[in-house]
Image (cartoon, rainbow, N blue to C red):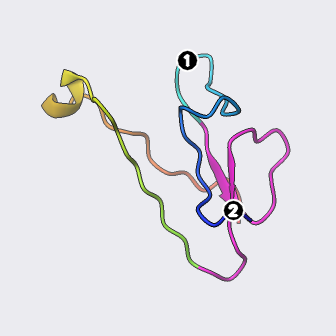
Amino acid sequence: MAPYPAVTSIDKAVVQNDDGSWDVFFGPERPDGADNWIQTIPGKGWNMLWRIYGPEQAWYDGEWQPGEVEVVSE
């Protein structure tokens, strides 16, 4: 496991959806078909950091917000 696992838009291996969105999966095992996956340690907590560089006006106006985190399975 990487000391600071991450999925970043500047990483050439990261896959963007056709509609411009990104799916990122968190878990101890990579789900089938999950290109953007961050490994977690079973029984340990984790946190997520959302960083935006150079946001457009819609961010400041509150017209754009990131999607909610969705539990796929437990």
Query: To which residue does mark 2 refer?
Result: 2
Query: To which residue does mark 1 refer?
Result: 19
Q: Tell me the residue at 71%/66% (across/down).
A: 74
Q: Tell me the residue at 82%/38% (across/down).
A: 33
Residue 35: quarter of image: top right
Residue 14: quarter of image: top right
Q: Residue 56 or 68: which is nearer the viewer?
A: 56
The quadrant of the rendering that contains the N terminus is: bottom right
Task: Give SS at disc 1.
Answer: loop
Q: Residue 66 or 52: which is nearer the viewer?
A: 52
Q: Which is the main secondary structure of the residues drawn in magenta?
A: loop
Q: Tell me the residue at 68%/42% (across/down).
A: 36
Task: Give SS at disc 2.
Answer: loop
Residue 62, disc: none
Q: Tell me the residue at 58%/62% (across/down).
A: 4
The disc labelled 2 sits on which kind of residue?
Answer: Ala
Task: Kindly give the residue lying farthest to the right in the view shown.
Answer: 32
Does residue 27 lie above or below 54 as drawn?
Answer: below
Residues in magenta, as a range: 23-44
Residue 62: quarter of image: top left
